[in-house]
Image (cartoon, rainbow, N blue to C red):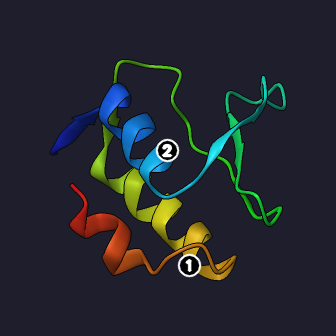
């Protein structure tokens, strides 16, 4: 399965206007938020992130109105 570095995911989230909001929720998910209060919870505890995880993150971001899943996946 294809993978992307966690650093690249963090960079793309910052480009979308998101910033780390807290240290996490104890489940391995970081919490990122934008200025409007919309959040997403990426799993970035390892050096690489599988495309399946990115797909799920894209769906979460789409449901919260940050960007569409296709736009997010196109970044990679």
Nearer to us in this view, 51 or 63: 63
Residue 26 in the image: state x and y as whole percent: 82, 25
Mark on residue 24?
A: none
**The C terminus appears in which quarter of the rendering?**
bottom left
**Residue marked by disc 2:** 14
Give the vertical position of 36 relative to 44 (above or below). below
Q: Residue at x 58, y 69 (%)?
A: 61
As drawn, which residue projects farthest toward the left? Answer: 2
Residue 33 in the image: state x and y as whole percent: 73, 51
Instruction: Nearest to the eye among marks 1 and 2: give it.
Output: 2
Q: Is 45 positioned to the left or the right of 3 in the image?
A: right
Q: Residue at x 35, y 26 (%)?
A: 7
Q: Secondary structure at mark 1?
A: helix
Label 1 to label 2: alpha-carbon separation: 16 Å
Q: Secondary structure at mark 2?
A: helix
Q: Residue at x 53, y 21 (%)?
A: 45
Q: Earlier in the sequence, mark 1 or mark 2?
A: 2
Answer whether labels 1 and 2 touch (C-beta < 8 Å). Answer: no
Q: Is 30 positioned to the left or the right of 46 in the image?
A: right
Q: Is 32 positioned to the left or the right of 23 in the image?
A: left
Q: How many marks?
A: 2
**Residue marked by disc 1:** 62
Where is residue 47, by image quadrant? top left
Disc 2 crowd rating (10 Å Cα; few below 14, some 14-19, many 20+) is some
């Amino acid at each position: 399965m294809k993978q992307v570095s966690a650093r690249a995911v963090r960079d793309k989230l910052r480009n979308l206007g998101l910033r780390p909001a807290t240290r996490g929720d104890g489940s391995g998910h970081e919490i990122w938020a934008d200025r409007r209060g919309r959040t997403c919870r990426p799993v970035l505890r390892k050096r690489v992130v599988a495309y399946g995880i990115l797909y799920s993150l894209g769906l979460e971001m789409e449901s919260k109105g940050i960007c569409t899943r296709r736009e997010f996946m196109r970044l990679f």
